[in-house]
Image (spheres, helix red, strand yellow):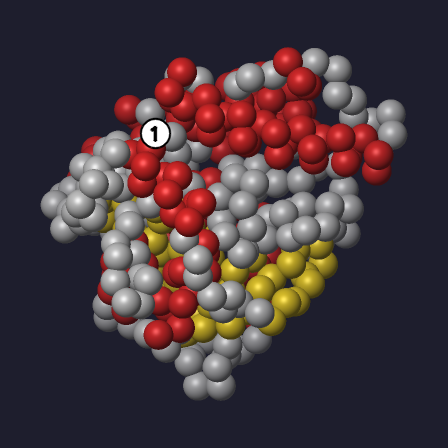
Amino acid sequence: MPVIESTYHPPLGFWNGHLQTIYPALYRRVPWITRQRERLTTHDGDFLDLDWDTTPAAGRLAILSHGLEGDSRNHYIQGMAAALQRADWDTLAWNFRGCSGEQNRLLPSYHSGATGDLQAVVDQALATGRYQHVALVGFSLGGNLTLKYLGDLGPGVDPRLERAVAFSVPCDLASSSRQLEGIMNRIYMRRFLTRLREKIRQKMILFPGQIHDAGLDAMRTFRAFDGAYTAPLHGFASAEDYWRQASCKPVLRRIAIPTLLVNARNDPFLGPRCFPEKAARENPHLHFEAPRSGGHVGFMTFNPQNEYWSETRAVGFLSEEI
C-alpha cells in the first residue's frame, strides 16, 4: 500500500512539534469514559487492570494501549474512548504492569515488546463471547507493542481481530532513543526518568536485595536506563539487544490485517528510522501516513466535541468494512 497523503493540518499557531506534544498533555480535559475496572490475573501470577466502557448492543470492541509511563486515564486514551463511544464501539483501555496506580507483584514490569500481556488482554476480551469484531489502537510504546504483536502473529492472527491503528510509534527503538538524547528533547527525557526512578525505588522496597539504585540518579538517557534495568529485568543482554528484539519495524511486513500507522514528521520522539515507507509499500495491509505536523500523540483540532483529528481518523479507519 503506498504511503498515504495526510489530510491533517494543525490549528493556526500550532505547527511546532513540541507545542503539539506538550499542549494536549498539559491542557486537554476529556471525560472519563472507561469506568468499569476488571483485574486480570496473568499466567505468571501478576495482574493487569482493564478499564472498560460497554453497552448492551455494541457488538464491536476497540482495545486501547497507552504509552511509556502512561495509563488508561491519559487524555489521548479517554479522548479516543469518547470518539469510539460516539461511533457505537465498546472500549477496553488496559494498564501495563505497574501503571494502574498500584505496583505490580513481580520484579519485571512492562516493556515495548511485552506482547504476551497484550495477548492476555485480547484473550480476556474474546472470552466474553460478546465480540466478533475487535480492533486494536496503540499510542507510542503501546503502538509499537500493538504492531509487534500483529507482526509476530502474521497470518495466524485471530479472525475476530479485524483492524488496527497506531499513532506516534517508535518503530525503531534505537533510533527513537538516540533522538531523545538530543538537547531539544531533554525535557521529555527528564520527565520519563523521574517516573522510572520512582518505580525502581518502589521495587527496591518490594524486592530488597534483588534490585538497587546505584548510579540511578546519574542516568540521563534510555541507553543508560534500559541497559541497567529494562534489559536485565526482562531477559535481554543489553539495551541494544532489547531495542533490536522489541522494535516492531522488522515485523511490519508480516502484518496481515488492515493497519494504519500515523507518525508525524515533526514528532520530537521519532528518529529517521521510525518512518517505514518501504514496509508500507511492500505490505498491502499496512497503511502509513506521515503528516508534516502533529507532534507526539498530538494531532490537535479544536471543535465543540473536543475530538482530535487522530480520533476522527482512527474511528473512520476502524469502521470501514466492519
Residue 1 is at least partly visible in this image: no
Question: Within the image, what quadrant is residue 317 found in?
Answer: bottom left
Residue 268 is at least partly visible in this image: yes
Q: Secondary structure at mark 1?
A: loop
At 44% from the left and 18% from the top, the residue drawn is: 181
Q: Quadrant of the C terminus?
A: bottom left
Residue 153 relative to residue 296: left or right: right
Q: Furthest residue to the right?
A: 208
Q: Where does the image place residue 126, in percent across and percent down from the top left? A: 53, 69
Residue 62 relative to residue 283: left or right: right
Of 77 and 159, the residue lying toward us: 77
Q: Where does the image place residue 21, in percent across and percent down from the top left? A: 36, 39
Question: Is residue 61 shown above or below 23?
Answer: below
At 20% from the left and 48% from the top, the residue drawn is: 11
Q: Where does the image place residue 163, in percent across and percent down from the top left? A: 34, 60
Question: Is residue 305 shown above or below 218?
Answer: below
Question: Is residue 289 shown above or below 232?
Answer: below
Check disc 1 and report the residue beneath it: 268
